[in-house]
Image (spheres, rainbow, N blue to C red):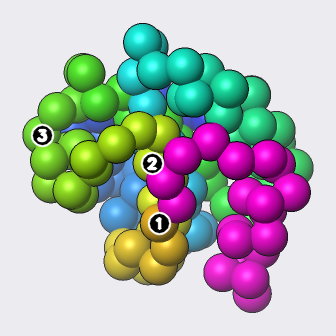
Amino acid sequence: MGALQVDEKNFQAEVVNSGLPVLVDFWAEWCGPCKMLSPIVDEVAEELKSQLKVVKVNVDDSQELAMQYGIMSIPTLLVFKKGEIVAQMVGAMPKQQLLNKIKPILN
């Protein structure tokens, strides 16, 4: 299944009000590093689906969300827990590095 696409219309319901921690991938179609990171994010979504919700926000389609959360470069990954940002990662990274940053938050 991978990650769910969200935008301004459903961000509040899917991310801020989620019972699970949420990994939000801010990306764009033209972004090379975003394309490298995308399959990794999808794998993490599948592996941790019982512990973590994973969503993607296209910054070209959701510019207000990108501005609201101060997204200056992409890919940027934010982790929300109980509606609050608890982690931020910028740039592409290997899957294990991403998991190392996320897993402590899930406990």
Q: Is residue 2 visible?
A: no
x, y percentage for residue 66? 23, 44
Which quadrant does the C terminus fall into? bottom right
Seen from the viewer's position, the closer of residues 33 and 42 is 33
Q: Earlier in the sequence, mark 2 or mark 1?
A: 2
Q: Is residue 103 left or right of residue 52?
A: right
Magenta region, residue range: 89-107
Which is in the foreground here, disc 2 or disc 3? 2
In the figure, residue 70 lies in which quadrant? bottom left
Residue 34: percent from the left, percent from the top?
Answer: 55, 29
Amino acid identity at mark 1 = Gln
The earlier-in-sequence mark between 3 and 1 is 3
Residue under numbered circle 1: 88
Disc 2 target residue: 76
Overall secondary structure of the magenta section:
helix
Q: Secondary structure at mark 2?
A: strand
Q: Is residue 22 visible?
A: yes
Residue 1 on the magenta segment: no
- The disc placed on residue 64 is 3
